[in-house]
Amino acid sequence: MQATEGHLWGTHVSEGVFMTMFGPFHRLGEQTPFAYIKEVICLIASNMPRDPTSPPIDVHVTGHSLGASYASLCYAELLRLYNNQPIDPFVTSPSKLILRDLYTFGSPRFALEDFVDVFMLVMDTHHGYSWRIVSEGDPVTLVPPVHLIDPKFIHLDKAWQVSENAEPQELPSERNSHPRPPIPVINMSYHTPWAYFNALYRAATP
């Protein structure tokens, strides 16, 4: 679907992921999860004792599995709204937050190429980085399979594959390309947080 109400630069993303992040929730008083998340982190920051001359608190966004797709859209919308400017608070005190990095682990595909193009273009001006981490053999990172559906969902750029048995490997962009097909044998053990911990420990250990 095309993002509505100006969200995500009006680009195309998964309808399910978009509506979960930007659709109204009854239990939140019809507030959207995105607005609720922003409100809560701003309120937490406003209650933290800090010197008025201190720099803003860096905000890093992260998620695993389907949560990684939600985290990516949340980060992208904060990026669209604020980029390198302090995040506007929902309280009267000055903002203490500024957006920095995105870290995702085991994310499925959730966006079309126009979203990825705009996202990476804006990231070129941002004082932070986007890191998409893939555990070798994780089947979730290969869905939905791009050769079976139309339109074709792709991943964000700047991806690294990690493994317990090999050095980290940078993955190629899926823009203007034909991403690899799903692996023939599905092993969900490669998708667990523990698998990611072990692979990242291997990558960080000399």
Image (spheres, grey):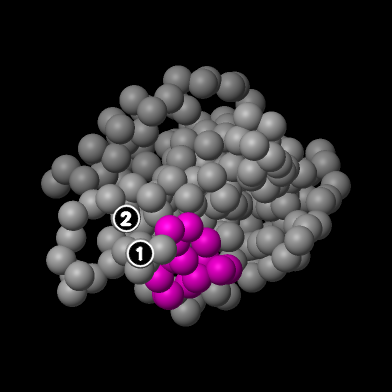
Q: Is residue 65 above or below residue 39?
A: above
Residue appearing at x 61%, y 35% in the figure: 28
Q: Which image quarter: residue 130?
A: bottom left
The residue carrying mark 1 is: 93
Task: Identify which residue, 46 or 184, lies in the foreground.
Answer: 46
Question: Which secondary structure type mostly characterizes the magenta part of the structure?
Answer: loop
Q: Is residue 16 left or right of residue 27?
A: right
Where does the image place residue 200, in percent across and percent down from the top left?
29, 40
Residue 114 badge: none
What secondary structure is found at the residue carrying circle 2? helix
Residue appearing at x 57%, y 50% in the figure: 35
The residue carrying mark 2 is: 46
Q: Amino acid at mark 2?
A: Ser
- Crowdedness near tag 2: few (<14), some (14–19) or many (≥20) residues, C-alpha within 10 Å: some
Contact check, label 2 and label 1, Cβ < 8 Å: yes
Q: Is residue 29 visible?
A: yes
The magenta segment: 78-91
- Residue extending farthest right: 150
- Residue extending farthest front: 92
Q: Is residue 162 left or right of residue 72?
A: left
Task: Identify which residue, 81 or 54, lies in the foreground.
Answer: 54
| Separation of residues labelled 2 and 1 (CA atoms) | 7 Å
What secondary structure is found at the residue carrying circle 1? loop
